[in-house]
Amino acid sequence: MNPSGKNYSVRSLGNVTSLGRIELHEALSLTGSEVTINELPSGVSVPFVHAHKNNEEVYVVLSGKGWLYIDGDEFEIKEGDAFRIDPNGARCIKADNASTLRFICIQAKANSLEGFTQTDGIPVDVKPSWL
């Protein structure tokens, strides 16, 4: 299923738990963020420490556990943890030696958000078939 229209695009990714890394910017024609679904096999690390020029990152750990290096600090991360890293934060992630680490990473330009769900959303006078 890959429907699309003037204001949306939908892509079926299949079994995301078996695909490794998935980048959504091209698949969904993203214009304000980058979203990736990532998997690090047990004991595997991102092979470099990095920062960003403009983008903050938000991570949500979906399963497993591992380690986060950020600005010289190292601490354990696990399923259910969510964290934000400023563009300048020097970061690296590693899966625990006994656990695959699966997480979503969302990148967006820092300080660019002008509204949130409650302040940006506006009611529209239409209804889906289930309402």
Image (cartoon, rainbow, N blue to C red):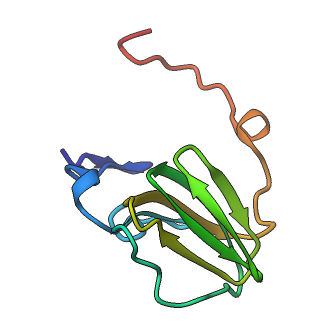
- Which quarter of the figure is the N terminus placed in? top left
Label count reads 0
Q: Is residue 122 above or below residue 2?
A: above
Q: Is residue 85 above or below residue 62?
A: below
- Which quarter of the figure is the C terminus placed in? top left
Q: Residue at x 52, y 53 (%)?
A: 61
Residue 45 point in image, percent of width and height: 46, 79
Using the rendered view, name the quadrant where residue 40 is placed.
Answer: bottom left
Residue 24 point in image, percent of width and height: 39, 64
Closer to the camera, 130 or 76?
76
Q: Residue at x 34, y 48 (%)?
A: 5
- In the rendered image, the residue lying farthest to the top is 131
Closer to the camera, 18 or 99?
99
Q: Is residue 83 above or below residue 97?
A: above
Q: Residue at x 79, y 37 (%)?
A: 119
Q: Residue at x 56, y 62 (%)?
A: 106
Left or right side of 18 for 51: right
Using the rendered view, name the quadrant where residue 36 is placed.
Answer: bottom left
- In the rendered image, the residue lying farthest to the front is 98
Left or right side of 9 for 113: right
Q: Is residue 2 above or below residue 25?
A: above
Left or right side of 127 for 4: left
Res. 32 visible in picture = no
Res. 116 visible in picture = yes
Closer to the camera, 41 or 53?
41
Residue 6 point in image, percent of width and height: 40, 51
Residue 35 point in image, percent of width and height: 48, 63
